[in-house]
Image (cartoon, grey):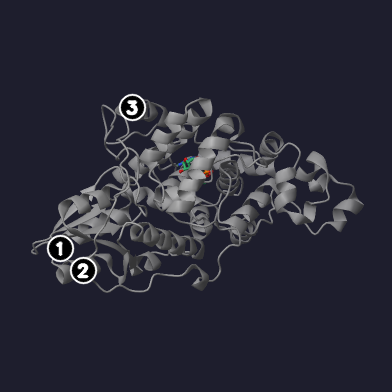
Amino acid sequence: TVSVALFTSDLRVHDQPVLRAALRAADQVVPLFVLDRGIARAGFDAPNRRAFLADCLAALDAGLRERGGRLVVRTGDTATEVRRVAGETGAREVHVAAGVSRYALDRERRLREALSGTDCALHAHDAVVTALPPGQVTPSSGDHFAVFTPYFRRWQEAGVRDALGAPRSIDVPSLDGDAPPRRDAVSGVSPGVPEGGESAARAKLTAWLRDGVEDYEDRHDDLPGDATSRLSPYLHFGCLSPAESVHRARRKGGPGADAFVRQLAWRDFHHQVLAARPAVSWSDYRERGDRWRDDAGTEAAVEAWRQGRTGYPIVDAAMRQLRHEGWMHNRGRLLVASFLTKTLYADWRTGARHFLDLLVDGDIANNQMNWQWVAGTGTDTRPNRVLNPLTQAKRFDPRGAYVRRWVPELADVEGAAVHQPWRLPEKERAALDYPDPIVDLSEARDRFLRARKP
Ligand code: FAD
């Protein structure tokens, strides 16, 4: 007998319920990944993620080969390819992670349709992509939590499922596949995109729990210190299991590990919002009556933001980190998103799109819901707060080291003066190839607050 383990956002062999269930169901398993053309059509096929994905698939193939198996890659439409593979092998069961985003839910529906009328059944597994499945905990009224704190309380009480070990051996039937993508064939990749894949992910998690997590509670907002886990791309592609990560962090224990687990719960929180309201990937979760700026100057201002040339060094540093690494520190994400949506009063969708074009961890649930949180159209209970980039800079980059790292034009400006280059003596200022601020902060704040509260 044959079954199919369809890999999607779960590119790993450890704690992999989909693979486990497929192995339990049959003597032989087809570990299948479909390079779906729909991803490209949806504009989600960005070079940074494509490069990282190539590593993830190579690592998954290696993990399967260590166990006597291999990865079968096909190209096309997922539902069509799965049906074809089931036909070619006589598979009776297809196992896949349950979907959360609209794209994944749609894929699941199309898989069901494609297999209906065949003698092959589809099984979707919960708690693969998230630690707790969306919908497992709900408030007394409503189908999802709109506020994090009560969600987190229930999330902790609910208990994350136990982690599964990796299978010992996998027998794959003979079957044709397409060549897997190669990282070096992808052009336009940011130079700092890390190596993807499960073995890199596991090594990073082990090192993080050994050396980094202890200080996490104190240092997670330290921009130049760069003291967060950087596990987000691996969690996004499922090279790491969120459930296993929670258990390993809890075993480590301490305030740093607790704070880290809380962030993993934020990830689940956003997923449960999106699962309950799939349309909010691009529409407002809470309609605030915004008429986002759309005058002649908007595009130039947004482009200056994209390029890291707003004249506000802390904003520009973070935007350049994004372009260089395909990753940005969370404090940076918060302040640049506030700058775009509140200071420039540009539509959050424009910013979310740019992030998705570059972030290796670019994720519909986390990206869109965080953008909405900052824009005040999401789940923030203080939707009208405006982050002042100068205050943020003084708090989170007090000596300016983060700015000097990412904005080379300002590398020679010493100390906190780097945050306000317009205040430098005229001669010094003129020698810098760095723009003047594109917007006045207090006027911008007033414009936003007037627009929000008519
Ligand atoms: P750590 O601080 O080490 O946290 C550990 C893990 O917890 C992260 O890897 C991530 O999986 C999760 N996590 C942490 N903070 C959040 C959060 N606020 N929401 C959801 N999960 C969180 N995260 C993404 O994974 N993908 C995105 O596309 C994304 N877009 C964002 C856009 C904006 C505007 C903002 C403000 C935040 C966004 N985040 C996104 C959340 C957060 O910034 C990143 O997860 C984090 O910076 C990744 O770095 P890390 O792995 O070192 O995080």
Residue marked by disc 3? 154
Residue marked by disc 2? 85
Q: Is residue 5 left or right of residue 224?
A: left
Q: State how far apart marks 1 and 2 are (Cα).
A: 8 Å
Asked whether residue 112 appears in the rendered view, the answer is: yes
Q: Position of residue 339 (x, y in %)?
A: 60, 46
Q: Which disc, if any, is residue 91? A: 1
Q: State how far apart marks 3 and 2 are (Cα).
A: 41 Å
Q: Is residue 36 left or right of residue 355?
A: left
**Which residue appears at 59% of the width and 54% of the height?**
322
Q: Position of residue 226 (x, y in %)?
A: 62, 42
| Mark 3 residue element | helix
- Amino acid marked by disc 2: Val
Mark 2, ligand 1, within 8 Å: the answer is no
Q: Callout 1 environment at 10 Å: few (<14), some (14 to 19), or many (20+)?
A: many
Dots 1, 2 in contact, CB < 8 A: yes
Above/below status of 310 relative to 378? below
**Which residue appears at 38% of the width and 58% of the height?**
60
Front residue of 59/446: it is: 59
- Foreground mark, 3 or 2, reads 2
**Which residue appears at 26% of the width and 57% of the height?**
170
**Which residue appears at 31% of the width and 46% of the height?**
128
Q: Position of residue 341 (x, y in %)?
A: 55, 47
Q: Position of residue 49 (x, y in %)?
A: 47, 60
Q: Quick one: label 3 or label 2, which is nearer the N terminus?
A: 2
- Amino acid marked by disc 3: Arg
Q: Is residue 427 left or right of residue 58?
A: right
- Amino acid marked by disc 1: Ala
Front residue of 406/388: it is: 406
